[in-house]
Every structure is written in C-alpha cells, then in structure tokens.
Image (cartoon, rainbow, N blue to C red):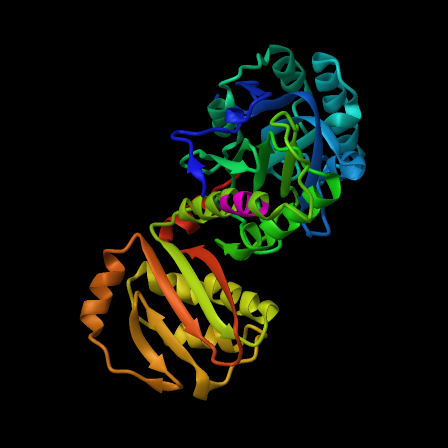
Amino acid sequence: MFSLIPSGSITDVPGFSSGAVRAGIKSTGELDLALLFSRVPCVAAGVFTRNRVKSASVILSREHLAIACAQAIVVISGCANACVGERGMVNAVEIVGLVAAKLRISPDDVLLASTGVIGSPLPMVCVRRGIEQIVLKENGGHDMARAMMTTDTVAKEVSLQVRIGDVDITVAGVAKGVGMIHPDMATMLCFVATDALVEADFLREALKRAVAISFNMISVDGDTSTNDCVFLLANGLAGGESINSRNGGVFQEALNEVCIHLAKSMVRDGEGATKLIEVVVERAKNQEEACCAARAVASSLLVKAAVHGSDPNWGRVVAALGRSGAQVKESKLGICLNDVCLMKEGNAIPFDAEKLKLSLKNSDCVVINAELGLGNSGAIAWGCDLSEEYATINSAYTT
C-alpha cells in the first residue's frame, strides 16, 4: 500500500523547504539550528509532553496550535530553554518573531521546538545570527535531521507515498531522541509533514492515535523530558477530496507507518544500545491493559539488562507483566523469546539455554511474546537493551 521513498526526508513533501546552520549553540560546532517552512499555510496539530515542568518552547507552541494552523517550525538543538524563568518565554517569543519576519508570515504561524541541557539560557546572540543565516532549500530535509540531533548517532527520517482516491500524497517525518525516552512522550522531537488535504479536527485525532501506538509505546530509560513534542503539518497541495473521519482510513495508516518507523528508529539508536527489543502482548483483557503490559516489559531495566547480556531470564518478563497493572493469571500465561516457547498456560517449558543465548547474542532485534489468555486485545511496545555505555554517556552529559 505504501511506497517508501529511498533516502527520504521531510522535504520530499511538495511545498516544504528547510535549512540548517551551525549557529554556535552546540559547543561541538555541529549543525544546531533548523527551519522548516511550507510555502502555503497548513492545517496543524501537536502532541506534547505530560511532564508538569515544561519548556517555554512547549508552552508557546501549544498556544499557537490552539487555532490549528501553522506554516513554519524552528528547531534549536543544544539548549532546552527550560527552567530558566521568565527569560525562557521572552526568548521564545523573540525567536518566533524573528522567524516570522524572515518568512513574512504571522508569529502565530511559527512553532518552536528546542532540545538539550535543562537550566541553561539560550545564547540569543547565536540564535539571532543563525536565523539570519538560514537558507531554505527544497532538498534541505537531511540537514534539518542532522541539526536536531543531540546524543543521537544517526539521523531519523522517513518518507512515503500513498494513493488516496484519485491523488498521490506524501507523508514524511523527522525525529530525534535516544535518551530520557519513556511512554507518554519522551526526550524527543518529531515533525511530520504531508501535502494531503486534511480537515483540522480529523488531523488532531489522527495524530493522537498515531502517537498512542508509536511514541507512547517506546522506552529507553524510563524518563520523560520537559521539551517533548510532535507536530503534524498538512499543506493540502495534493488536492483531491478533503480527508476526514469518514474517508481517512488510508491516511491514518500512512501516518501510523511514519510514526512507528521513527519511534523504532529512536529506541534502536538508544543511548548505548546494541539491540532493539520488541514486546508483543496478545490476548489481554482489553486494549488499555495490553498497552500497559507491553510497556512494562519494554521499560523494565532488568529485562533490558538481561537482553544486553543475552541472558534468557524469562522470569523477569513474567515479573514485569505481574506488576504492570494489567490483569495477569499465571495459569493462563505464555512467554516466548525469539520464537522459543518458555512458558505455556503457566507451566515452564524445557528449552536449550545455550542455543537460545546464542540466538539472543546474534539478534539485532529480540522479540518477546507474552500471551495473557484473558481476552482478544493486543499491543506492541519497543525498547532497547541497557549497556554500560548508557551509564557512561549520562554520567558526564553536562561535563
């Protein structure tokens, strides 16, 4: 159904351009300031962190999205602009004003995202100069992806095309974040663009549904940040029939595909990670409990450590399920690890431990299946292993 665009980027979407510069926000001299722009106004939606401490960027962008319209996104990497008092909002307002003047649009149509160390004020001299220097390009998406990175080791991008009715549309996204990642949003920024013609109410609901099965189903370390946001912009340039709840099924599937791809890319690149973990929960009592159980296993530090050591210690999976909040009955429970059945209907199944350990060692993706036997609902969550390098990275993050 979907056609992936090789080496795709967010500027594959017609009407969007992007640019990035080395403004000097990061001490490393890397790209650290980026701008995404649609040549026409967009219907827009956003989802934000549930952390009760929020950056000025989150607060301001949420206000701007109240009218479900935007035309540009400015991204700052290297400074969170969080926990700096009133100065944070003053700087945020100035930034969107500078971008709006540069693009000749309303400040209300500019969204702001920032990521980096909490508690440090923005170096506004660098930001002002950087905004002046940005040059928008129709193929600038790859530079934007690199500019967003902090401890990421690779850029995270995806682009696909799908036919809806009589028109072909493009949906593309870019994301960053590999640490402080946990369900209910994480230390992540994600921007999705499309040329589909989408009604505002449906766009908001479609984004919420896509986030629920993607970014809210991943975990690296159990922490959630102050700056997390996902923005979705639809400029409508593809034309065709307006997409809404009545005819939006294919668009929803395309959006889900983009968000899941980016979410998995984040945990695959988790700080210090060597393996992706996929947790598949089946036959839960209901959808909420299926999600709860899958997230508990994917976020378990003991499960993550066992996977890193290629240790088939499936008791840790059972323990995580038992404390997840989902209904679990031992007599109904089944556990498989990389397709090896370890427990069925509450009974342990003999297995070749050395063979399974070798399978885990040689797997880039370790799959954990848990069958609860209490209903017909299922869910998938993703995590990564926990390595010594994670502690090294985070023990010296600001020094």
Image vertical order of residue 26 relative to residue 263, above or below: above
Which residue shows up at 36% across the image and 62% down it?
367
Q: Quadrant of the N terminus?
A: top left
Residue 240 visible, this orientation = yes
Decide whether the magenta segment is chiefly helix, strand or loop.
helix
Q: Quadrant of residue 317?
A: bottom left
User: Is 62 left, or right, of 397 in this rendering?
Assistant: right
Q: Residue 124: image x %, image y %?
A: 68, 21
Image vertical order of residue 21 relative to residue 357, above or below: above
Residue 185 visible, this orientation = no
Image vertical order of residue 62 relative to residue 330, above or below: above
Residue placed furthest toward the front: 166
User: Is 193 left, or right, of 58 in this rendering?
Assistant: left
Q: Residue 361: image x %, image y %?
A: 24, 58
Q: Residue 201: image x %, image y %?
A: 75, 44
Check residue 275 for magenta coloring: no
* Highlighted magenta segment, given as a residue range: 252-257
Which residue shows up at 65% across the image and 41% down it?
227
How many dots with numbers?
A: 0
Check residue 255 for magenta coloring: yes
User: Is 315 left, or right, of 250 in this rendering?
Assistant: left
* Residue nearer the viewer, 14 or 363: 14
Q: Quadrant of residue 336?
A: bottom left
Q: Residue 161: image x %, image y %?
A: 48, 34
Which residue shows up at 59% across the image and 32% down it?
193
* Residue nearer the viewer, 378 or 75: 378
